[in-house]
Amino acid sequence: MRKLALTDDILMKIEKPARYIGNEVNSVMKDKTKVDIRFAMCFPDVYEIGMSHLGIQILYDMFNRREDVWCERVYSPWTDLDAVMREKKIPLFALESQDPIKNFDFLGITIQYEMCYTNILQILDLSGIPIKTKDRTEEDPIVIGGGPCTYNPEPLADFFDLFYMGEGETVYDELLDLYKKNKAAGGSRWDFLEMAAEVEGIYIPSFYDVEYKEDGTILSFTPNNVHAKENIKKQVVMDMSSAPYPEKPVVPFIKATQDRVVLEIQRGCIRGCRFCQAGMLYRPTREKDVEVLKDYAYKMLKNTGHEEISLSSLSSSDYSHLKELVTFLIDEFKSKGINISLPSLRIDAFSLDVMGQVQDIRKSSLTFAPEAGSQRMRDVINKGLTEEIILDGAGQAFEGGWNKVKLYFMLGLPTETEDDMRAIPELADKIARRYYEIPKDQRNGKCQITTSTSFFIPKPFTPFQWARMYTNEEYISRAAIVKHAFNDQLNRKSLKYNWHDAEVTVLEGVFARGDRKTSAVIEEAYRLGCLYDSWSDQFDNNKWMQAFENTGLDIAFYNHRERSLDEVFPWDFIDIGVTKDFLKREWNHAMNAEVTPNCRMKCSGCGVAKWKGGVCIESKN
Amino acid sequence: MKARIKFRKYGVMRFIGHLDVMRFFQKAIRRAEIPIAFTSGYSPHMIMSFAQPLGVGVTSDGEYFDIELTEAIASEQAVAQLNAVMVEGIEVTGFREISSDKKASGMTIVAAADYKVTQPQTFQHAEDIRVLSAKWKDSVCAFMKEPQIIVWKKTKRSEKEVDIKPMIYDMHAEDDGIFLFLATGSEQNLKPDLVMEAFLRFIGENPEEVPLHFHRLEVYAKNPESAGGTTKNDFISLEDLGKDIVTT
């Protein structure tokens, strides 16, 4: 029997002990004496969140296919266990072997959102690994980061030995082989890092020096090691259909956020919304073969026993075989008691038909993400959704029996005026009016239009990377304008408005575009006790503000400046395929409220066509 | 056709709560391709009902749930198919047909359960147990000779004094622990930890300072042939109410 890292008295005292015992269906056990590399894969948030992440499941499966590697999982201990581990000096352990992370060769951390940064420090701290890469020795695992936030890795540069830029399926094998070779040859940690620096897509922050101008912006970013490359090229998988994908994902005992089979149908998005980082990072759009997906659906449902299957991608309506795939899933699995969970789809006759088949119309709601209230603003952000399309879609759905609509918008977008803000409630009201056009005896009571706004955060590698942000107070006053305008609407009783807090937005803004200097704030915030900052009940803005004060960093420098077009950004050394010239063109188009057609309509020359794959070669076959 | 599944819960699986064990079996039944029936309606779910929930930390040799089958499957085959998709810590030990009579199925029939209570050396490891002391052995006899055993019992609404003695059908000391046979189910329900708490207070020990491990041995219904007593013969295990399925 496996010996657990935590004793019975601890497990009986903490919330959800199942988070820490491993043993789940499809988790992989190996003989640790028979592998060469032990890899701990970490999602720095609580188990139920981390277990829902597709990327880790893909890499876990891919690594464990190798006989010489045992990849295990580790998540952030919840605050109750965190306190016990500190008090009793219990080192953080991996779920499968229950062995301390400190004994592993690698600790790989996926970095999905900025507000997990203090949790990364918790993982290192509880593992007994020095927080800063410069303090680590031959006894410590190599700490490697990946995921969307690594496209600006600089706020975390002090904490990671290396970063993997791009999709994990491509050069990990090469990296692991090098590690093995170096270990066998008796090479040091430093030797390995120098070897790794030669691998495409691998960035070793300590091999670069940054110099700053007097105004605080970057003067130069230069390699200080002969092995380090000038530019780091993002890694992309060109053949999605044959890329590794788990047929037997791990099935948690406790309910995870994503408690279902997830089929990734495509990567990338053709739309080119100017605020969207994923839409730029994952170019070009690459589809998976529909027959391959059908086969995965069978195998994954059989191997997990899940009662639900869902599709994952950006803008799923653009998947060219969507109709065939959804029809297949319904025909094949619905009679077996499997729920088909649909992604948010463009509203048309087809999507209403399948929604009617798989959901209870009275309970389910329609979702639109116009992102901006006025047509002018939607043109600025290049969101190709018009009022006509929204009202027409909503109308069709209302006539089909739906009466609940959810709307998502952003506030604080570049060039936003009060008119743009007021256009949000006006659009919600027009949708309600469309509902009440249906004769009373043919409609299903009142309608419910729920509007949510979040605050826009400019992200690296988007056309809006030059945009400024605002203060907490300014954000709240913008939400208040929207709130007041809701009260003026004819159908205000059918309209509901929710807005997000702005404190977290401000911090996300700093770290999304922050430089190396901001790592001091993260370390200080952690020292002051910040943890689980993405959890509203744990988040403590006062401590964060204290951390800025203690480190002398100025939020305004990061958030309130509109950056000049020739500014050197902390992330400029990364080559994501999309050129800075294209982003500049798009920024200028945005300022003139000019739309850019999507990739299927017309190529706009963003730069990724050089890879000759996906949507870039679709019509040219 | 209705079937009753019996399983063991041991090792690290004792930390998985009742609701999560239910979820585990819903998925396991799909993986094992057991021909289970679903309810009709918009969101069909498996026809499945669990007996007497087991507390977190407790192990068991006698856990049960009943399911509705769409077609017969041989007991031996069903057990093999289920065990092929289990995890360490859960083992299916029986798969039997039960009467489709509402009164015989469902879990309202549960009337008693027996337990083995062991004394781990420390609170840290339940498996590392000590031999029962002579003092404890003697005290168990004395405890059971009490005319009444009054405890504070929490109900949903209030807390009240209850005499649990009539609900303890048997309690005796064995070399490796204390055996308990207790009223269980919807009519009368006595949890083993409440008995042990009363016992520890009786011998002057602080229940919070004494590590104990509870292991459920079996769950019983009233024996239809019994005149209504509370001896072992007046009860029948849930498993024995069913019969093995043999298909040709």
Image (cartoon, coloured by chain):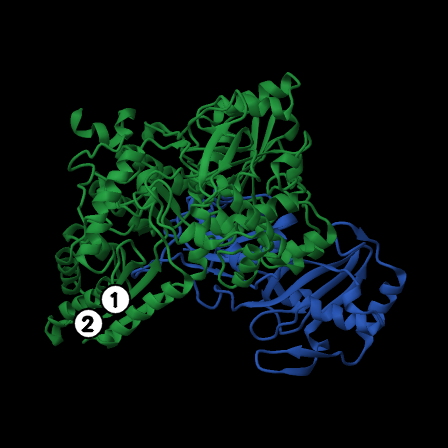
Chain colours: A green, B blue
Q: Residue A82, how many percent across, how many down?
A: 64, 54
Tell me the subunit letter for badge 1: A
Most foreground residue, A488 or A103: A488
What is the residue that sits farthest to the top in this orientation? A185
State the SS at label 2.
Answer: loop
* Above-or-below relation of A132 to A365: above
Amino acid tagged 1: Arg
Quarter occupied by residue A179 = top right
State the SS at label 1.
Answer: loop
Most foreground residue, B90 or A569: A569
Q: Residue B18, how many percent across, how many down?
A: 55, 59
| Residue A593 visible | yes
Most foreground residue, A245 or B141: A245
- Mark 1 / mark 2, whichever is N-terminal: 1
Amino acid tagged 2: Asn
Give me the C-alpha separation between circle 1 and circle 2.
9 Å
Q: Quadrant of the C terminus of chain A?
A: top left
Q: Residue B202, how many percent across, how many down?
A: 82, 74
Please say if the residues under marks 1 and 2 sit with CB atoms less than 8 Å apart. Answer: yes
Badge 1 is on which residue?
Answer: A362
| Residue A444 - label | 2
